[in-house]
Image: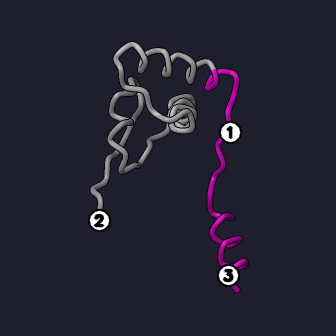
Amino acid sequence: RKEDEIEAMLENLFLLNTTKTSSILAAKIRNNLEKIGKAIPTADIIIASIVIDTNSVFVTKDKHFEHIKHLKTIFVAES
């Protein structure tokens, strides 16, 4: 059953949430990106702030994340 497969997959994921620190980081990221004319979607800014706040590494295909300071990113090639 598809729902069972999805639930099994989700059990292996670690959920990261926003914090006060990540929210402040998100505001700083947005401000910095606006200063350099590199605005990106708000959801991506929130994701980046959580990754930075948790000292994690972000894996993505989206090159616009390269403009975010202090974001540890691994870029994968489009398939």
* Mark 3: secondary structure: helix
Neighbourhood count class around disc 2 (C-alpha, 10 Å): few under 14, some 14–19, many 20 upward = few
- Which amino acid lies under the numbered mark 2 shown in the image of this protein? Ser
Q: Amino acid at mark 3?
A: Lys
Q: Label 3, label 1: how many angstroms apart (C-alpha)?
A: 26 Å
Q: Tell us which disc is closer to us: 3 or 1.
A: 3
Query: Residues in magenta?
Result: 1-23
Q: What residue did someone put label 2 on?
A: 79
Identify whether 22 is placed above or below 60. above
Instruction: Indicate the position of residue 67 as horizontal and vertical percent values.
Output: 34, 28
Q: Tell me which residue sits at (72%, 77%) in the image.
A: 3
Residue 28 x %, y %:
52, 16
Residue positioned 63% across, 69% down in the render: 9
Q: Position of residue 23 (x, y in %)?
A: 64, 24
Circles 2 and 1: CB distance less than 8 Å?
Answer: no
Compute the Cα span from label 2 to label 1. 29 Å
Disc 1 is placed on an element classified as loop
Residue 47, picture quadrant: top right
Q: Residues within 10 Å of mark 1 (few under 14, many from 20)?
A: few
Quarter occupied by residue 37: top left
Q: Magenta region's main secondary structure?
A: helix
Q: Closer to the N terminus: mark 3 or mark 1?
A: 3
Q: Quadrant of the C terminus?
A: bottom left
Mark 2 vs 1, N-terminal side: 1
Considering only vertical position in the picture, is 56 above or below 13?
Answer: above
Which residue position is annotated with label 1? 17
- In this rendering, the answer to whether 57 lies above or below 33 is below
Tell me which label, 3 or 2, sits earlier in the chain.
Answer: 3
Residue that appears at 36% across and 50% down:
61
Say which residue appears at 36% left-offset and 37% top-offset: 64
